[in-house]
Protein backbone atom coordinates (compact mmCIF):
# COMPACT_ATOMS: atom_id res chain seq x y z
CA UNK A 1 0.00 0.00 0.00
CA UNK A 2 1.46 3.32 -1.07
CA UNK A 3 0.66 6.63 0.57
CA UNK A 4 -1.94 8.62 -1.37
CA UNK A 5 -0.35 10.98 -3.88
CA UNK A 6 -1.49 13.78 -6.15
CA UNK A 7 -0.78 14.45 -9.82
CA UNK A 8 -1.75 17.63 -11.66
CA UNK A 9 -1.96 18.46 -15.33
CA UNK A 10 0.47 21.35 -14.78
CA UNK A 11 3.03 18.84 -13.40
CA UNK A 12 2.46 16.67 -16.50
CA UNK A 13 3.04 19.69 -18.77
CA UNK A 14 6.10 20.96 -16.88
CA UNK A 15 7.78 17.54 -17.00
CA UNK A 16 6.89 16.62 -20.59
CA UNK A 17 10.38 16.87 -22.14
CA UNK A 18 12.04 14.94 -19.29
CA UNK A 19 9.36 12.23 -19.36
CA UNK A 20 9.61 11.95 -23.15
CA UNK A 21 13.39 11.55 -22.97
CA UNK A 22 13.13 8.99 -20.15
CA UNK A 23 10.84 6.89 -22.34
CA UNK A 24 12.61 7.16 -25.70
CA UNK A 25 16.31 7.86 -25.06
CA UNK A 26 18.70 5.07 -24.16
CA UNK A 27 21.66 6.49 -22.24
CA UNK A 28 23.69 3.27 -22.42
CA UNK A 29 23.69 3.20 -26.22
CA UNK A 30 23.30 6.98 -26.53
CA UNK A 31 20.54 6.50 -29.06
CA UNK A 32 16.92 7.47 -29.50
CA UNK A 33 14.05 5.11 -30.22
CA UNK A 34 13.69 6.50 -33.72
CA UNK A 35 14.62 9.81 -35.31
CA UNK A 36 11.11 11.20 -34.89
CA UNK A 37 11.36 10.75 -31.11
CA UNK A 38 14.52 12.89 -31.03
CA UNK A 39 12.88 15.54 -33.23
CA UNK A 40 9.86 15.66 -30.92
CA UNK A 41 12.13 15.99 -27.90
CA UNK A 42 14.04 18.83 -29.53
CA UNK A 43 10.78 20.67 -30.24
CA UNK A 44 9.55 20.16 -26.65
CA UNK A 45 12.82 21.60 -25.31
CA UNK A 46 12.95 24.47 -27.80
CA UNK A 47 9.28 25.52 -27.68
CA UNK A 48 8.72 24.83 -23.96
CA UNK A 49 4.92 24.48 -24.28
CA UNK A 50 2.99 25.59 -21.18
CA UNK A 51 -0.41 24.15 -22.09
CA UNK A 52 -1.65 20.76 -23.25
CA UNK A 53 -2.75 21.82 -26.75
CA UNK A 54 0.70 22.60 -28.21
CA UNK A 55 2.10 19.41 -26.66
CA UNK A 56 -0.60 17.40 -28.43
CA UNK A 57 0.27 19.20 -31.66
CA UNK A 58 3.98 18.35 -31.27
CA UNK A 59 3.49 14.73 -30.17
CA UNK A 60 0.48 13.99 -32.35
CA UNK A 61 -2.06 13.18 -29.63
CA UNK A 62 -3.01 14.17 -26.08
CA UNK A 63 -1.95 10.92 -24.40
CA UNK A 64 0.97 12.56 -22.56
CA UNK A 65 -1.13 15.24 -20.87
CA UNK A 66 -4.43 13.43 -20.31
CA UNK A 67 -5.32 12.59 -16.72
CA UNK A 68 -8.26 10.21 -17.06
CA UNK A 69 -10.10 9.50 -13.81
CA UNK A 70 -10.51 5.80 -13.00
CA UNK A 71 -13.97 6.61 -11.62
CA UNK A 72 -15.64 8.68 -14.35
CA UNK A 73 -13.02 8.40 -17.14
CA UNK A 74 -13.10 12.19 -17.63
CA UNK A 75 -9.88 14.10 -18.27
CA UNK A 76 -9.09 15.96 -15.05
CA UNK A 77 -6.78 18.79 -13.98
CA UNK A 78 -5.89 16.79 -10.87
CA UNK A 79 -5.98 13.18 -9.73
CA UNK A 80 -5.48 11.63 -6.31
CA UNK A 81 -3.91 8.17 -6.49
CA UNK A 82 -4.71 5.61 -3.80
CA UNK A 83 -4.02 1.91 -3.34
CA UNK A 84 -1.01 -0.16 -4.32
CA UNK A 85 2.15 1.30 -5.81
CA UNK A 86 1.21 2.01 -9.45
CA UNK A 87 2.37 -0.76 -11.77
CA UNK A 88 0.97 -2.91 -14.54
CA UNK A 89 -2.18 -4.57 -13.22
CA UNK A 90 -1.73 -3.11 -9.69
CA UNK A 91 -4.69 -2.37 -7.45
CA UNK A 92 -4.33 1.39 -7.85
CA UNK A 93 -7.01 3.99 -8.48
CA UNK A 94 -6.49 7.58 -9.61
CA UNK A 95 -9.62 9.62 -9.04
CA UNK A 96 -10.69 13.20 -9.73
CA UNK A 97 -11.95 15.63 -7.06
CA UNK A 98 -15.58 15.03 -8.10
CA UNK A 99 -15.29 11.27 -7.60
CA UNK A 100 -13.26 11.81 -4.40
CA UNK A 101 -16.04 14.01 -2.98
CA UNK A 102 -18.64 11.40 -3.98
CA UNK A 103 -16.61 8.73 -2.16
CA UNK A 104 -16.21 10.87 0.95
CA UNK A 105 -19.95 11.54 0.98
CA UNK A 106 -20.41 7.82 1.67
CA UNK A 107 -18.49 8.11 4.94
CA UNK A 108 -20.84 9.06 7.79
CA UNK A 109 -20.16 12.55 9.17
CA UNK A 110 -19.58 11.23 12.70
CA UNK A 111 -16.81 8.98 11.34
CA UNK A 112 -15.03 11.93 9.71
CA UNK A 113 -15.29 14.02 12.88
CA UNK A 114 -13.94 11.16 15.02
CA UNK A 115 -10.89 10.92 12.78
CA UNK A 116 -10.32 14.70 12.93
CA UNK A 117 -10.50 14.50 16.74
CA UNK A 118 -7.98 11.62 16.73
CA UNK A 119 -5.54 13.71 14.72
CA UNK A 120 -5.98 16.72 17.03
CA UNK A 121 -5.21 14.51 20.04
CA UNK A 122 -2.09 13.12 18.34
CA UNK A 123 -0.85 16.63 17.55
CA UNK A 124 -1.48 17.80 21.13
CA UNK A 125 0.50 14.83 22.44
CA UNK A 126 3.41 15.71 20.17
CA UNK A 127 3.21 19.36 21.24
CA UNK A 128 2.45 20.48 17.72
CA UNK A 129 0.20 23.44 17.03
CA UNK A 130 -2.96 22.48 15.16
ZN1 LIG B 1 -13.87 11.17 -11.68
Image (cartoon, rainbow, N blue to C red):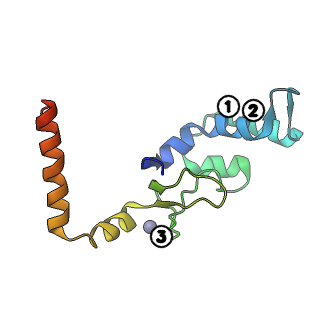
Q: Residue furthest front?
A: 125
What is the CA distance from the residue labelled 2 to the residue labelled 1?
A: 5 Å
> Helix, strand or loop at disc 1?
helix
Nearer-N-terminus badge (3/2)? 2
| Front tag of 3 and 2 | 3
Q: Quadrant of residue 24?
A: top right
Please provide percent x and percent y for residue 17: 66, 36
Ligand 1 neighbours mark 1 (CB distance < 8 Å): no
- The quarter of the picture where residue 121 lies is top left
Please indicate, yes or no, whether residue 77 appears anywhere in the rendered image.
no
Q: Which residue is mark 1?
A: 45
Which residue is tagged 2?
42
Quarter assignment of residue 15: top right
Describe residue 11's horizontal placement relative to residue 88 as left or right: left
Say which residue appears at 19% left-offset and 65% top-offset.
Answer: 111
Q: Residues within 10 Å of mark 2 (few under 14, many from 20)?
A: some
Q: Is residue 11 above or below residue 115?
A: above
Front residue of 39 and 120 = 120
Disc 3 and disc 2: Cα gap in Å?
A: 35 Å
Residue 71 disc label:
3
Label 2 CB sits under 8 Å from any ligand 1 atom: no
Amino acid sequence: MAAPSICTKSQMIASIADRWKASYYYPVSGGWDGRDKKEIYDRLVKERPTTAAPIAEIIGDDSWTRLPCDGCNQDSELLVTVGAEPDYDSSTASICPTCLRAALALVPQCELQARDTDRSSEQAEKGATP
